[in-house]
Image (spheres, coloured by chain):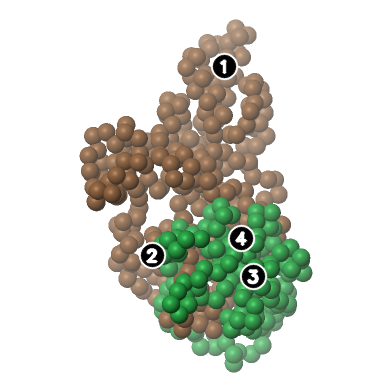
């Protein structure tokens, strides 16, 4: 829970009093779940409901990889500890709880009023990305399935290429270590596809979600132009081909010359963001995008 | 929508203490509070007990409150409101589960909108937003 978020403070101050609940056992199998304490501090939203109902949580992996999103709070749920129970994407807000107002706690009612007030400022906004893939942290959850039972192990073999699984056997810890080595260059094709390692990006060095990779690619194109003018050595044909593939793969731009790429990069650098969920590529945020209530590191 | 996604839904509820005594919005005996200068539209199930409960609650805290059937929610219905809430009765019926019909919104929708529970889930289905259920 992001306790300093405005929805906990304006116009009504929501009490910071928390209750302890046992950490749900299902959280343990999620990335980071094994490190959680035995009890979690929670803000009660409602008691036992008069009518059976259910709430919702959204996928927390990669949720904030676009600047129009805020993960404000999780909620005790049947998925995992990173799931989103209170979150915003542009003009849309998920209030994941289902209680009617007369069954909500007083603090929850304050919170709901605050959420309405907070959301009013996002009139006219639209989401910057749609969910066409999943955040790379899913790879660690899938790795944990390895060796559990036949159908899950089979599933893992459909999620990772043979090269990543080679020598791993049924040991999830080995697969997780291997994933950690290649994390900067992981990709997932579509929502239900297979994780892969982008060998082009890996050969060039910087992570695929680091703008330094684009800088490296543009620099390679510029080196060709300089070499043509007799200033410096030309990059290898292999690196040049990699650079062109990487630029096309991660930017959705169809530019040609080094100068064009440099101009595009410098014009947009301050507003660029990389989204796994949006399809493992860079996007350019609009100039008038309202800032998040809180900056994220 | 098949039953399978519903059964796989996450439960984002926290059982805890009941409503707090007279300390926040929504408590009947609480003195009147200054209303927030916002107009809120609740899009739920026409005439339902839940809709009435939300209407009463929102009416205490906001300058304007309206209701509309969730399936009839559109730009015209929302044009005079600052925030829209999409909600529904519980999908659990006597011997069945009935997923609420979605609010017919798409990604051209720009009104601030709060999605709740099962109705939020059904409305999110197909929009490909990050808020969609796990």
Q: Which subunit holds the residue at mark 1?
A: A
Q: Which mark is residue A92?
A: 4
- Both on one chain, marks 2 and 3? no
| Residue under the point 52% across and 58% down | B132
Q: Which subunit holds the residue at mark 2?
A: A
Residue sitting at the far front: B95
Residue sitting at the far bottom: B29
Q: In the drawing, does residue A157 fall left or right of residue A227?
A: left
Instruction: For marks 1 and 4, give the one nearer the viewer.
Output: 4
Element assignment for label 4? strand
Q: Which residue is mark 3?
A: B70
Instruction: For marks 3 and 4, give the one nearer the viewer.
Output: 3
Figure colour of chain A: brown
Q: Earlier in the sequence, mark 4 or mark 2?
A: 2
Q: Which residue is mark 2?
A: A78
Q: Which subunit holds the residue at mark 4?
A: A
Query: Circle 4: is it few (<14), some (14-19), or many (20+) Cα within 10 Å?
Result: many
Contact check, label 1 and label 2, Cβ < 8 Å: no
- Residue B100: % across, % down: 55, 69
In this view, A26 is above or below A63:
below
Figure colour of chain B: green
Instruction: For marks 2 and 3, give the one nearer the viewer.
Output: 3
Q: Nearer the viewer, residue A48 or B74?
A: B74
- Both on one chain, marks 3 and 4? no
């Amino acid at each position: 829970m992001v306790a300093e978020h405005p929805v906990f403070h304006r116009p009504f101050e929501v009490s910071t009093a928390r209750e302890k609940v046992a950490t749900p056992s299902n959280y343990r199998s999620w990335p980071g779940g094994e490190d959680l304490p035995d009890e979690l501090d929670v803000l009660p939203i409602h008691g036992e409901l008069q009518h059976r109902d259910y709430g919702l949580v959204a996928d927390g992996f990669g949720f904030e990889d676009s600047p129009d999103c805020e993960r404000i709070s999780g909620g005790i749920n049947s998925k995992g500890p990173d799931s989103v129970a209170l979150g915003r994407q542009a003009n849309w807000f998920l209030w994941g709880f289902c209680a009617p107002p007369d069954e909500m706690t007083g603090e929850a009612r304050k919170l709901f009023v605050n959420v309405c007030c907070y959301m009013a400022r996002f009139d006219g906004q639209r989401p910057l990305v749609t969910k066409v893939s999943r955040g790379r942290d899913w790879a660690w959850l899938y790795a944990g399935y390895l060796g559990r039972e036949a159908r899950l192990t089979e599933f893992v073999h459909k999620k990772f290429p043979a090269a990543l699984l080679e020598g791993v056997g049924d040991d999830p810890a080995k697969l997780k270590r291997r994933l950690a080595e290649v994390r900067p260059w992981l990709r997932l094709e579509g929502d239900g596809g297979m994780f892969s390692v982008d060998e082009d990006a890996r050969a060039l060095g910087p992570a695929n979600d680091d703008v330094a990779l684009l800088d490296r690619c543009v620099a390679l194109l510029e080196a060709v132009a300089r070499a043509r003018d007799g200033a410096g050595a030309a990059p290898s044909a292999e690196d040049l081909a990699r650079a062109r593939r990487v630029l096309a793969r991660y930017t959705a731009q169809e530019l040609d010359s080094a100068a064009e790429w440099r101009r595009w990069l410098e014009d947009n650098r301050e507003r660029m963001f990389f989204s796994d969920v949006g399809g493992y590529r860079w996007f350019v945020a609009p100039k008038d995008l309202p800032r998040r209530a809180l900056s994220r590191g | 929508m098949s039953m399978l996604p519903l059964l796989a839904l996450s439960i984002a509820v926290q059982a805890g203490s009941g409503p707090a005594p007279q300390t926040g919005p929504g408590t009947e005996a609480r003195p009147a509070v200054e209303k927030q200068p916002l107009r809120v539209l609740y899009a739920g199930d026409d005439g339902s007990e839940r809709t009435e409960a939300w209407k009463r609650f929102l009416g205490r805290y906001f300058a304007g409150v309206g209701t509309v059937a969730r399936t009839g929610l559109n730009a015209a219905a929302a044009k005079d409101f600052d925030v829209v809430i999409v909600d529904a009765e519980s999908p659990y019926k006597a011997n069945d589960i009935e997923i609420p019909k979605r609010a017919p919104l798409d990604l051209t929708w720009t009104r601030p909108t709060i999605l709740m529970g099962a109705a939020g889930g059904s409305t999110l289905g197909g929009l490909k937003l990050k808020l969609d259920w796990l």
